Image: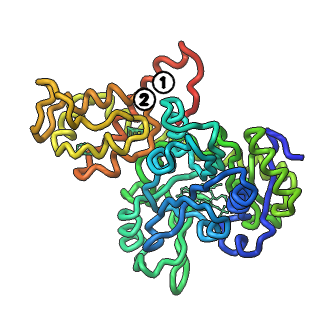
Amino acid sequence: MAAKGDMIYAWTTDSGVAKKAECGGAVTTLLKYALENKIVDVVVAVKKGFDLYDAVPVAITDAKDLDQTAGSLHCGTLLMSTFIQKYLDGAKNMKVGVVVKGCDLMSLIELGKRNEINMANVLTIGVNCGGSVNPIQGRKMIREKFGVDPDKVTKEEIDKGQFIIEYEGGHKGIKIDELEDEGYGRRTNCRRCKYKIPRQADLACGNWGVIGEKAGKATFVEICSDKGADLISKAVSAKKLETSAADPKGIEIRGKTEGAMLKLGEKWRKKEFTALRDNLWDFINKETSRCIKCYSCIEKCPVCISTPFEGRPESYMVRPGYIPSDPMFHLRRFASISDSCVNCGQCEELCPVEIPLALISHAIRVEGDNAYVPKLGAAPYKN
Ligand code: FAD
Ligand code: SF4
Ligand code: SF4
């Protein structure tokens, strides 16, 4: 019997899933099992859309359709929580199984606190996340830095500190550090992220720490809740999944890898926040002066659940119809949401005039945590 706190290797017994899966196919198999056995009514996962750079969230009710969602897509601007909030009625009337990265999970929790999502109805299968890449930047990086036509790429992955591509005619990997020093690489919010293993999910799954003959063929699963333990036990009893205890050496390697990623996150925070600290107001005024008041940053933010200002009188500090926006338009937004910003990057990435909004909100969140959390108690998660 699996138990909360266990660390295991897990692999699927389904040859179709094994072929498509990123590692051991545990994630897809567990979701399939949950759907087939009515533990959940619907699964929210991700599948390839138009091309490799088009990661699309999907809601699936027929277990056999889940095979198309196996595998990891690193180029995308996804947030699974808002998908559940907007399109599945916040799981209020159905049980939802969902694959979550750290930012998906933090925003689910925030939406749960705001009664926008019923977390009691949500089964969360976490995936470790070293970061994702903006689709447009990803194509540019592959063309300019790798010297490869992005349309010829058949697989991309982030492994052992490298961004690796497979393409017609070969494969190539370049160190993430090198890419990021030159302005390519992961999304800027992912660089600053320090929530790499989503341990507030029911299960946290990844490849870090799978060594020996199981390397690449099993998923490392950390069992984080009784609900997660129950799902694993049932899937193993039904012979859908096989498991073994994780190798202690593998657990040690996994700890070191996580530690290295956290250090990298800290490095980026230091670099970006220090520059901001000296100059915050000027930076906000200058950057937000491009704003065309499209409201995308308000609509897409998972912690900002107020409806756009439509129909509401705006004050003389935020004059209706004026663009660029008055500074108070943004100052109010930063003041109201930054205390719970989860650094998902949605606001920034979807802003048509490329204002570094997530950088500002995240900096305010982290500086606030650093100043007050020691006095008030531990932060719920270190985003
Ligand atoms: P599978 O059975 O192949 O299932 C994978 C699931 O992930 C599917 O349900 C799929 O729909 C979903 N998925 C695919 N892309 C996304 C996405 N962009 N957002 C949300 N869900 C998605 N593991 C590590 O140990 N270290 C890492 O640094 C790391 N970085 C990752 C970065 C990203 C962007 C993603 C998506 C995953 C990352 N993982 C990382 C997790 C790893 O790639 C596998 O997902 C995990 O090991 C589970 O393997 P599996 O064979 O059981 O999954
Ligand atoms: Fe995500 Fe931006 Fe909202 Fe922060 S402010 S939670 S980065 S959308
Ligand atoms: Fe302004 Fe950008 Fe927000 Fe649109 S998304 S309202 S342009 S800051």
Q: Amino acid at mark 2?
A: Arg
Q: Residue furthest front?
A: 93
Question: Tag 2, which secondary structure?
Answer: helix
Return the x and y of residue 123 as percentages of the image width and height: 66, 45
User: Toward the viewer: 183 or 206?
Assistant: 206
**Residue on which disc 1 sits:** 369
Q: Which of the labelled discs sits on residue 67, or is there none? A: none
In the visual, does 176 lie left or right of 215?
Answer: left
Which residue is drawn at the image coordinates 38% and 35% (left, top)?
304
The image quarter containing residue 359 is top left
Return the x and y of residue 209 as percentages of the image width and height: 74, 54
User: Toward the viewer: 158 or 2?
Assistant: 2
Question: Tag 1, which secondary structure?
Answer: helix
Q: Is mark 2 within 8 Å of ligand 2?
A: yes
**Residue on which disc 2 sits:** 365
Rendered position, 252 above or below 34:
above
